[in-house]
Image (cartoon, rainbow, N blue to C red):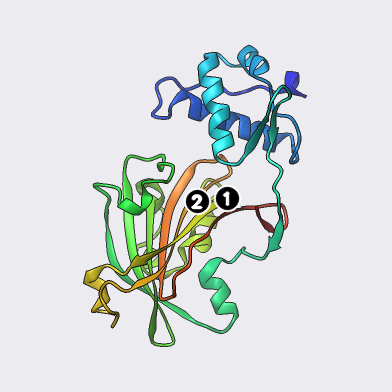
């Protein structure tokens, strides 16, 4: 199968490092051929023969896929598509907001901030960068049954924000409702981090919360079919202490967690 597959040329003038491009090419190869967990990925020598890049770039690309939980290395055997230790089928197609609506809880979004990102906020420091030098922060309050439910923050490429009207970005469900409109922004993989954070001081008083009180914060990286990080997002919920990290991906018919 590999000999009939043609990898695209590396863009040496682009902003993406070569090893990132190679990692994305390998991931696309696996999706294109429908590889399943446990199937072998191209070897280092095979990739060297088919890509005009250095051995070091290939090794960095493979290491990146391993770090992203996409692949696993086996000593003396090669690199294989990651086999999840556990797979749980969940209906996550509608996201947080639409799921609550299906339960009869109507969410109202109140725009707080919409501005260009000059300096990435601290909560994004552990995330893969968004592939756009121009990014926009949208900060909204989510209100349910007249009470503050969560603070929502989304960082999106400026080129994506430009596709939507001001009213859509102010009030519509951003993910997946708006993002799913276009193939290049439809989210197929999300990596979440859960931690406890205080509500920003400037908003604590507005929403009747004690300053410094800790709430559950869910922050995430959102990836498209090309495995490009196209959005950073965070919700701060009114909740008790809790911390967990997991990843889930969209399959043909459902989402899986592993």
Judge left or right: residue 217 versus residue 63: left
Marks 2/1 in contact by CB < 8 Å: the verdict is yes
Task: Name the residue: 51% across, 17% down.
Answer: 56
Q: Mark 2 highlights which residue?
A: 222
Question: In terms of depth relative to the viewer, which is nearer, 12 or 213?
Answer: 213
User: Residue 82 at x, y = what percent?
Assistant: 68, 40
Which residue position is annotated with label 1? Answer: 189
Dot 1, how many residues are within 10 Å of its Cα: few (below 14), some (14-19), or many (20+)?
A: many
SS at badge 1: strand
Residue 48 x, y percent position in the rendering: 61, 14
What residue appears at the point 50 percent right and 25 percent down from the top-left corner? 19
Tell me: residue 116, above or below residue 61: below
Q: Where is residue 164 in the image (x, y as percent from the top left)?
A: 40, 58
Q: Is residue 143 left or right of residue 3?
A: left
Could you tell which of marks 2 and 1 lies nearer the N-terminus? 1
Question: CA–CA distance between discs 2 and 1?
Answer: 6 Å
């Amino acid at each position: 199968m590999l000999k009939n597959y043609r990898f695209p040329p590396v863009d040496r003038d682009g902003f993406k490092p070569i090893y990132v491009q190679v990692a994305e090419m390998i991931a696309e190869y696996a999706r294109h051929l429908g590889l399943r967990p446990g199937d072998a990925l191209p070897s280092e020598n095979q990739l060297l023969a088919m890509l005009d890049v250095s051995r070091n770039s290939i090794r960095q690309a493979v290491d990146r896929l391993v770090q992203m939980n996409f692949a696993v290395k086996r000593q003396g055997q090669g690199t294989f598509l990651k086999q999840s230790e556990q797979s749980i089928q969940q209906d996550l197609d509608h996201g947080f907001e639409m799921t609550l609506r299906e339960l009869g809880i109507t969410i109202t979004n109140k725009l707080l901030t919409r501005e260009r990102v000059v300096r990435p906020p601290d909560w994004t420091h552990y995330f893969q960068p968004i592939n756009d030098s121009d990014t926009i922060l949208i900060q909204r309050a989510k209100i349910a049954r007249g009470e503050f439910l969560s603070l929502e923050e989304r960082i999106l490429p400026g080129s994506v924000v430009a596709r939507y009207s001001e009213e859509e970005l102010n009030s519509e469900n951003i993910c997946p409702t708006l993002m799913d409109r276009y193939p290049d922004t439809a989210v197929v993989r999300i990596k979440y981090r859960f931690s406890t954070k205080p509500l920003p001081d400037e908003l604590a008083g507005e929403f009747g919360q004690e300053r410094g009180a800790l709430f559950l914060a869910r922050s995430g990286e959102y990836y498209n079919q090309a495995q490009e990080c196209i959005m950073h997002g965070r919700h701060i919920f009114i909740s008790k202490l809790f911390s967990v990290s997991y990843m889930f991906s969209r399959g043909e018919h459902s989402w899986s967690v592993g």
